[in-house]
Image: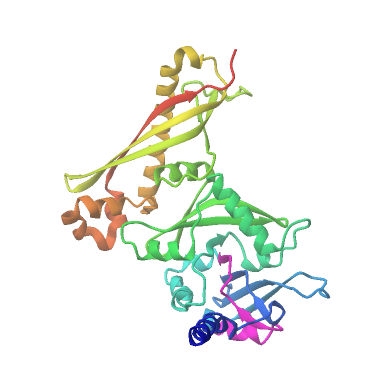
Amino acid sequence: MIRRLHFLILTMLLAILPGCADLRNLEDVTLALMAGIDLSEKNELLFYVSSPVFSKDAKKKVEEYGVRADSIRQSTKRFDALVTALTVGGKIQLIVLGKRLLQHPDWFSLLDTLYRDGRMTVNSRVVVVDGPVHSVFHLNPADKPRLPLHLTQLLDTANRRNLTVKTTTQEFHRMMAEKGMTPSITEFKERNSVVEVMGTALLDHQGKYVTLLLPKDTILLQILIHKLQGEMTLTVPLPGQSDQQKVIKPRVSFFVKDVTRTVKTGYRDNRFRFDVELQMEISLAEQMFPVEPAKQYKKLEQLIEKQLAQKYADLIKQFQKQKVDPVGFGVYARAYQYKEWKKVQDDWPAAFAKAEVRVKPVISIKGIGITE
């Protein structure tokens, strides 16, 4: 009995003690919550880090550093020569990339250590800033949480409103490795010490910056890739009544309650064909033209379907013109038309640019609000 008790105590100690071997106090580490990479006008790589200060004697609660280096690993050593404690990157919330950096097609190799080092997190968000990265790291917004937490909450809120996408480092790695789609990440801008989400940055298959997708179009993209977050509102104009002199423009806004997506893939006349049906249940939020939804809801459904179909046609046309596929139509081509996919897999964006894509919204009005 005593031997069993000793064995039980020994087992408990072995289970607990190994976790204390590398114990570090918060005061003894520089806990990087935000990292940045940019390119100077002289094509020099610039690395930035922002971390909270836990000392009760410190007047400034966040410290920022910037160094010139050739890689993330080298920059870490230089940060250690500047900060008062050992730099730790396992809690990074945001990786901020400069737009100038993303104009070079081979920049993605800089992130290699994030995926190779098991101590690094793969849940941090990858974002691009329209402007110099150092302007973001030197922000000191009043009445806001620490800068890394403030930016993280801001971008997450924008994603919940479907104004931009949310791409983690792990998801970004998958997008870069996937031949059947091109990456997309959040883009924001700093203006007069205020951060504004601009929309979604679309990249090519090498990670090079291509164009910006505005928030109103990002909502359409979120529906198409079936990644709706929280409450989403769409607004469509009334066709045939675009009088520029009118102050109040005729339009209808609605909440999207549910979306069921069906994608059919084919190949004919030497090009891929995709037929996408979006069955959408909506509830009216605002109506600014004389149609009684309770009596003419079928007419209103058809009107919304027509306008949404045109919006999607314009969006797909933009994707094909820029040779980007943020939706991932190539994944469907590989799954259902593998024989033809193999011929174009190494240059899918060019094949997608020639594809025929039709998006058919099917609207069902489930609520018209409080009416008389």
Locate residue 185, reporting x and y percent: 49, 57
Residue 184 drawn at (x, y percent):
45, 56
Left or right for 345, reference 246: left
Residue extent of the magenta highlight: 74-97
Q: Is residue 124 above or below residue 72?
A: above
- Left or right? Give the position of 272 relative to 28: left
The C terminus - image quarter: top right
Q: How many marks?
A: 0
Q: Residue 126: where, in percent of width, then height?
A: 52, 63
- x, y (%) of residue 289? 55, 18
Q: Residue at x 59, y 55 (%)?
A: 188
User: Residue 82 lies in magenta, yes or no?
Assistant: yes
Residue 122 part of the magenta-drawn span: no
Q: Is residue 179 visible?
A: yes
* Observer-nearest of 277 and 269: 277
* Residue in view at x 53 percent, y 62 percent: 125
As rendered, which of 321 and 251 lies closer to the eye? 251
Quadrant hosting residue 231: top right
Q: Residue at x 47, y 29 (%)?
A: 282
Q: Is residue 208 visible?
A: no
